[in-house]
Amino acid sequence: MTTTIAHPPGEGVASLDRRDLAITGMTCASCVANVESALRGVSGVKSADVNLATERASVQLDPTRADVPALVRAVERAGYGALALSADQKERALVEDRERAARRAQLVSLRRRLVVAAVLGSLTMIVSMADLVIAGIQHEPWRAYLMFALATPVQLWAAAPFYVNAWGAARHRQVNMNTLIVVGTTAAYGISVVATFLPQIFFGAGLCRSISCRSATSSSCGPAKRSRPMGSSLRATRPSTKRCSPANRCPWRKAPAMTWPAGR
């Protein structure tokens, strides 16, 4: 929609136009702030207001300095989608049809990521807990690498929308729930990868490896996925800072399991 806001001739202020945009990809109030910040950063924009409930943005701008494509690009760089709404009813109907098609495509993509993540995450969990049924499997050298192969697509592919949105927020010096998910799961995944391929780092510090890698989970409509622990003996859900005695190391493949003193 386009609306012209005229000022009295003597004020020396250029006429402002109002542009309405349909915004996709917002999930919280922080997303609203990110989109508003991105729009206000466009040269020539005087004000920008975003409504999360209607997923609409109203922008006042100087038409001689800013245009709709610049607004759309700014929103997309922030990690969201935008479509310009026209005042003409026929054109507006066409744009709304495109918006619905874009939302359906996004839903299909999220559903696909969710299914893949659920399958791989379930297999990872089964492998990580198989030693409860199959004795001695926790010492098999291939077990950690199999869990790594299963968990990696969940973290890097299924969680890709979280990384994109978190990066868009970071570019505007903002944080949101995507940032929280990305920071937490990337740290857990990275530590688990180190524990799998470079266990000597933990043993060199005299620490027991007990790290879990849980992948990003969407709050309402994104891909929900979790990758279970990724090491041959990674079972707990938090790092352990207990030190191992030199004569009795933490379990690692064929190393003997240690026992903790009573009361610890």
Image: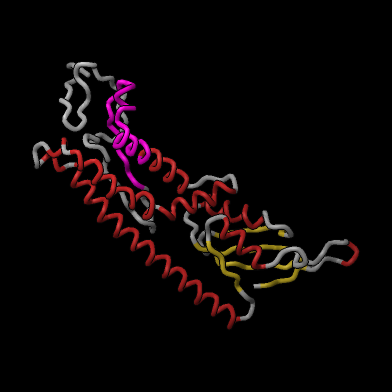
Q: Is residue 43 left or right of residue 37?
A: right
Name the residue rendered at 15%, 25% in the picture: 256
Q: Which residues are magenta?
A: 189-215
Left or right: residue 67 compared with residue 203: right
**Where residue 112 sits: x, y (%)?**
33, 63
Give the residue at x 39% y 65%.
107
In reply to whether residue 194 is colored magenta, the answer given is yes
Residue 33 x/y as whole percent: 58, 51
Seen from the viewer's position, the closer of residues 186 and 93 is 186
Quadrant holding the C terminus: top left
Front one among 19 and 213: 213
Name the outermost residue toward the right: 10
Q: Which corner quadrant of the image does residue 183 belong to? A: top left
Asked whether 16 falls inside the magenta stretch, the response is no
Image point 47% across, 70% down: which residue? 102
Residue 71 position (above or below residue 251): below
Q: How many marks?
A: 0
Q: Quadrant of residue 127?
A: top left
Question: Given the current orientation, which residue lies at the most extreme bottom position?
Answer: 90
Colouring scheme applied when the structure was drawn:
secondary structure
Residue closest to the eye, 245 or 242: 245
**Image quarter of the N terminus:** bottom right
Q: Position of residue 43 (x, y in %)?
A: 72, 57
Identify which residue is drawn at 54% across, 79% down: 94
